[in-house]
Image (cartoon, grey):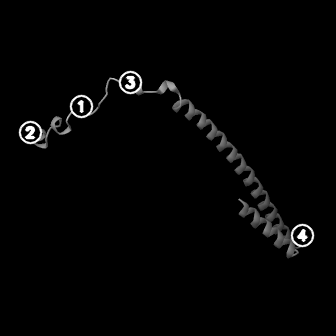
């Protein structure tokens, strides 16, 4: 953003340095273009600040939502599986059918 502001300021300095005649058609046009560019840069800066504020608000809301969802003690699932002390009670290779057994079906 600062880059655009610097470029517009540079153009304004060039226009002042070249002593562009404000009374000529070309001079009026160039000076008006530079003024419009300056206004556009100001609007973009303001919009950028508004967008940053909005993103900050959304980030805060999301953080509150994450705290509510993930830090809430009601959502502890450790007790749901206390009957299952060991999930590896079976022998993997013995319980699974071999490739020959599945192809004969």
- Residues at marks 1 and 2, CA–CA distance in whole angstroms: 28 Å
In the rendered image, which quarter contains the C terminus? top left
Tell me which label, 1 or 2, sits earlier in the chain: 1
Q: Which residue has dot 3 on it?
A: 80
Q: Residue furthest toward the left?
A: 104
For marks 3 and 4, give the one nearer the viewer: 3
Question: Taking the image as drawn, is residue 98 in sight?
Answer: yes
Residue 89: mark in rendering = 1
Residue 104: mark in rendering = 2
Image location (x, y in percent) of residue 62: 59, 37
Q: Are marks 3 and 4 in contact (CB under 8 Å)?
A: no
Q: Residue at x 13, y 43 (%)?
A: 99
Image location (x, y in percent) of residue 57: 66, 39
For marks 1 and 4, give the one nearer the viewer: 1
- Residues at marks 3 and 4, CA–CA distance in whole angstroms: 81 Å
User: Callout 1: 10 Å neighbours few (<14), some, many (20+)?
Assistant: few
- Residues at marks 3 and 1, CA–CA distance in whole angstroms: 18 Å
For marks 4 and 2, give the one nearer the viewer: 2
Tell me which label, 2 or 3, sits earlier in the chain: 3
């Amino acid at each position: 953003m600062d880059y655009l502001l610097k470029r517009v300021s540079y153009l304004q300095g060039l226009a002042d340095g070249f002593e562009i005649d404000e009374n000529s058609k070309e001079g009026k046009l160039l000076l008006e273009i530079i003024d419009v560019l300056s206004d556009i840069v100001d609007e973009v800066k303001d919009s950028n600040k508004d967008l940053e504020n909005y993103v900050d608000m959304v980030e805060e809301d999301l953080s509150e939502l994450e705290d509510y969802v993930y830090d809430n003690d009601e959502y502890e699932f450790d007790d749901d599986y206390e009957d299952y002390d060991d999930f590896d009670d079976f022998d993997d290779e013995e319980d699974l059918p071999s490739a020959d057994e599945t192809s004969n079906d």
